[in-house]
Amino acid sequence: MAKPGLDGHDRGIKVLAAAYRDAGMDVIYLGLRQTPESVVKIAIQEGVDVIALSILSGAHMTIFSRVMDLIKENNLSNILVTGGGIIPEEDVEELANIGVGKLFGPGTPVNESLKYIESWVKEHRR
């Protein structure tokens, strides 16, 4: 889990990280101001199943697109890229077209994203 870009609003992702840990997931929270390159590098090093990004700054198209480019460059088709933030519906559709998984907006119940991730991992686990 990471907060890429210059967005400093991290309360929500910290709540999610704690909830996911409480549900039994191994969670690595990279913190604020991460680059797509650092996120993908650590995902490779740690052998993660999921990359979850929280973006409230409006840079979602640039950041998610770069992460997906790096995923493809590194042949990591077995990693789910998901996340949330303030993302207009037309951008959600465009991001889905490049392979980004389900995105969650503010106010989404924690259990909804938790169940989505658990289901995806169960279906795609290596």
Image (cartoon, grey):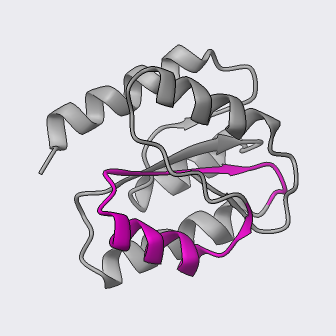
Q: Position of residue 4 (x, y in %)?
A: 70, 64
Residue 36 forms part of the magenta stretch? yes
Q: Residue at x 39, y 27 (%)?
A: 116
Residue 117, quarter of the rendered image? top left
Task: Say if 70 sits above or below 13 in the image.
Answer: below
Q: Position of residue 59 (x, y in %)?
A: 76, 64
Left or right relative to 56: residue 81? left
Task: Say if 75 sits above or below 20 in the image.
Answer: below
User: Camera-side residue: 97 or 105?
Assistant: 105
Number of numbered discs visible in the structure rendering: 0
Q: Residue at x 47, y 43 (%)?
A: 27
Residue at the bottom extreme of this rendering: 73
Residue at the left extreme of this rendering: 126
Residue 65 forms part of the magenta stretch? no
Q: Position of residue 83 (x, y in %)?
A: 57, 44
Left or right relative to 32: residue 115? left
Q: Residue at x 31, y 51 (%)?
A: 49
User: Camera-side residue: 103 or 40?
Assistant: 40
Q: Position of residue 63 (x, y in %)?
A: 64, 68
The magenta stretch is: 32-58
Residue 34, quarter of the rendered image? bottom right
User: Camera-side residue: 68 or 9?
Assistant: 9
Task: Say if 109 sits above or below 40 in the image.
Answer: above
Left or right relative to 105: residue 70? left
Q: Residue at x 49, y 30 (%)?
A: 21
